[in-house]
């Protein structure tokens, strides 16, 4: 792959895997994305799209909902509609 076609990488920094979260309390979802310039980061919760962050730092406030016992956070990095990483 040419450098501009190399998929970016993404890592969820917080919340940590297995973290205890409190219903009704805000948390920060933080993502580290690396790769080509002009990155976008998509964030999801329980498989549902939450937001696209357009510039670093890739962070999003989120209030832990009532009525759920488990949350799964996802993130992927994109290069302006051309190349994307798999969901993390």
Image (cartoon, rainbow, N blue to C red):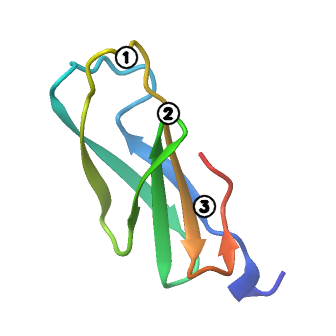
Number of residue marks: 3
Q: Residue furthest right?
A: 1
Name the residue at 41% across, 53% down.
Answer: 31
Between the C-alphas of marks 2 and 1, the distance is 10 Å
What residue is drawn where x is 62% and y is 79%?
A: 81
Q: Which residue is mark 3?
A: 9
Residue 12 lies, with reference to residue 52, above or below; the image says: above
The N terminus, quarter of image: bottom right
Residue identified by numbered label 2: 46
Left or right of 18? Residue 5 is right
Q: Secondary structure at mark 3?
A: strand
Q: Are marks 2 and 1 in contact (CB under 8 Å)?
A: yes
Q: Secondary structure at mark 2?
A: loop
Q: Based on the displayed image, in which of its 4 quarters is residue 5 positioned?
A: bottom right
Which secondary structure lies at badge 1?
loop
Q: Position of residue 56 (x, y in %)?
A: 33, 70
Upstream in sequence: badge 3 or badge 1? 3
Residue 78 disc label: none
Classify 37 as above or below 77. Answer: below
Q: Mark 2 or 1 closer to N-term? A: 2
Q: Residue 53: horizontal and vertical position, in percent? A: 37, 66
Of 80 and 32, nearer the camera is 80
């Amino acid at each position: 792959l040419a450098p501009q076609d190399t998929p970016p990488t993404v890592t969820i920094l917080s919340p940590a895997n297995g973290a205890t979260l409190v219903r009704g309390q805000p948390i920060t979802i933080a993502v580290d994305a690396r790769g080509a310039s002009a990155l976008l980061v998509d964030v999801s919760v329980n498989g549902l799209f939450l937001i696209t962050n357009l510039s670093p730092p890739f962070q999003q406030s989120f209030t832990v909902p009532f009525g759920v016992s488990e949350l799964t956070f996802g993130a992927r990095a994109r290069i302006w509609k051309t190349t994307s990483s798999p969901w993390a």
